[in-house]
Image (cartoon, rainbow, N blue to C red):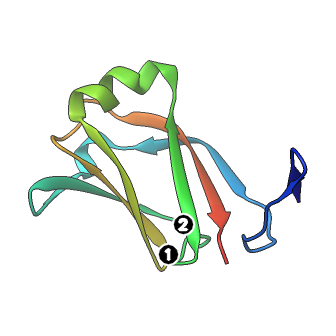
Amino acid sequence: MKINGITVSGGGGSSPTLLSNQTLASGSWAVSGSYFEYIFSNAGINTSTSVDITPYNDSISATQDAGILPQIITVAGACKVYAQITPSTDIICDILITPTT
């Protein structure tokens, strides 16, 4: 693929998968070291995927108040999302799973 005449390569050649209207339940966060961790399970996630989470506008206060951290760790069948404190309400979001190799 070319962007502004520059060839960009990489990626797995597969299309990203968009999971709309997903819920990160406020009661499902657990202590993990000095953070709180949420494990989102999906068969399409593995160590060769990138996961991006975009909270809906109505959930932005919950993400800001909880201090949701930017790093998302992928493992076989799931991803791990981290926060400084447990969100007080559910977070509704879109989750984009993108193959990277």
The residue at which mark 2 appears reads as 42
Above or below residue 79? Residue 82 is: above
Identify the secondary structure beneath mark 2.
Answer: loop
Placement of the C terminus among the 4 image quadrants: bottom right
Q: Which of marks 1 and 2 is nearer the N terminus?
A: 2
Position in image of residue 75 (x %, y %) = 43, 76
Above or below residue 101? Residue 78 is: above
At a point 81% along the width and 72% down the height, the residue shown is 13
Q: Which amino acid does label 1 sit on?
A: Gly
Position in image of residue 76 (x %, y %) = 48, 80
Comparing 42 with 79, the one in front is 79
Which mark is drawn over residue 77?
Answer: 1
At a point 45% along the width and 42% down the height, the residue shown is 23
At a point 62% along the width and 59% down the height, the residue shown is 97
Identify the secondary structure beneath mark 1.
Answer: loop
Mark 1 and mark 2: Cα distance apart in space: 5 Å
Position in image of residue 96 (x %, y %) = 62, 51
At a point 66% along the width and 62% down the height, the residue shown is 98
Location of residue 30 (image quadrant): bottom left
Above or below residue 77? Residue 32 is: above
Left of 60 or right of it: where is 77? right
Comparing 40 with 5, the one in front is 5
Q: Is the residue marked by circle 2 packed among few (<14), some (14-19), or many (20+) residues within 10 Å?
A: few
Residue lying furthest front in this view? 5
Say whether marks 1 and 2 touch (CB < 8 Å): yes
Q: Which amino acid does label 2 sit on?
A: Asn
